Image (cartoon, grey):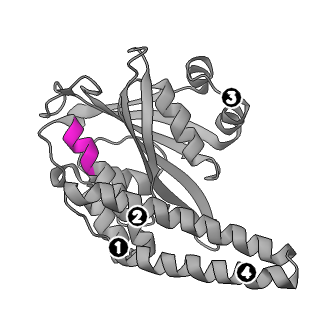
Amino acid sequence: MKDLNLGLPQFEAFLDALGVPDSCLLNKPLYKKMFQEHAALDARDKKALKDDVEKVRWLYTLKPSTINIAPYLDELRDYGELAILHIELSTTKQAERIGHFINRAIPYPLVIFFTHSIGKEGSGNNDELALCLADKRINMADKEKWVIEDLQLSPWIPLQHPLGDEPTVVNQNFLSSLNISALPTANFWQLYQALISRLIARQCAEVTGIYRLTNDADESQKNEYLCQYQQTELAIKKLRAQIQKAEFSQQVTLNTQIKQQEQKLKQLTELL
């Protein structure tokens, strides 16, 4: 791997473990002005870009001329190549929003690696990483534009070591599974879907404590269960906020609803 000179040795070690061929290396900066001009940002997007984004770099371009992977094209999707970006954030709060407008601005399937530097007492700065993917399709009304069908963001993972800071088995297995040699490479669509499968499996591992890949037939169902789990967690949070302000007679009903939702969480955990 060529030295990227990113000033982030932990992240560079992760990239080295990723195994992307040097033939794919681009490593060019993308300036904020480009997104301001081409991404149709609203006020909150502009604030996130200004305040939260430190740097954006286009690290790699994977296309048939740089790697032995075939393009994929059908009436809905054009996966002729993939771009791998690195975005340094000053704070992680708006990462999902930033992922959305970056995907709107760049007309390629994107693999985005967010990094964020955090301080630890006595040890200086340490980096943490999150993977952002978005399944996109061609806008049939305007084929120059893309529709983002589903954006996924992984949990944040420490990068003290290429496989995590005091790496858990979950983080080891997840990051190792991103190595390009571990991915299907018949075409770019298959490769991207395999990355999405791994990201969803890592999200599920936040609930189950186990990083487990499933076959394609089970993946859609697992994602649905994960969405239900997240929605149920949100419902419990809202009920607990309500109970703080409720009269005693209402608290009994709210407590019953919380217990029902907690039981649903247990059932969903088993399905994940």
**Given the image, on which type of amino acid does mark 1 rest?**
Leu
Whole-number angstrom distance, CA of label 4 to CA of label 1: 28 Å
Of mark 2 and mark 4, the one earlier in the sequence is 2
Query: Relative to the observer, which residue lies in front, 128 or 74?
Result: 74
Which residue range is magenta in the image? 189-194
Tag 2, which secondary structure?
helix
Q: Nearer the viewer, mark 3 or mark 1?
A: 1
Q: Is residue 257 left or right of residue 191?
A: right
Tag 1, which secondary structure?
helix
Q: Which residue is mark 2?
A: 225
x and y percentages locating residue 139 in the rendered image: 40, 21
Q: Is residue 186 left or right of residue 41?
A: left
Asked whether disc 1 touches disc 2, contact meaning CB atoms under 8 Å apart, the reply is: yes
**Given the image, on which type of amino acid does mark 3 rest?**
Asp
Mark identifier at residue 271 = 1
Mark identifier at residue 253 = 4
Whole-number angstrom distance, CA of label 3 to CA of label 1: 38 Å
The quadrant of the image that shows the N terminus is top left
Q: Is residue 190 magenta?
A: yes
Q: Which residue is mark 3?
A: 42
Identify whether 54 is placed above or below 236: above
Q: Nearer the viewer, mark 4 or mark 1?
A: 4
Of mark 4 and mark 3, the one earlier in the sequence is 3
Q: Is residue 71 magenta?
A: no
Tag 4, which secondary structure?
helix
- Alpha-carbon neighbours of circle 1 within 10 Å: few (<14), some, or many (≥20)? few
Q: Nearer the viewer, mark 4 or mark 3?
A: 4
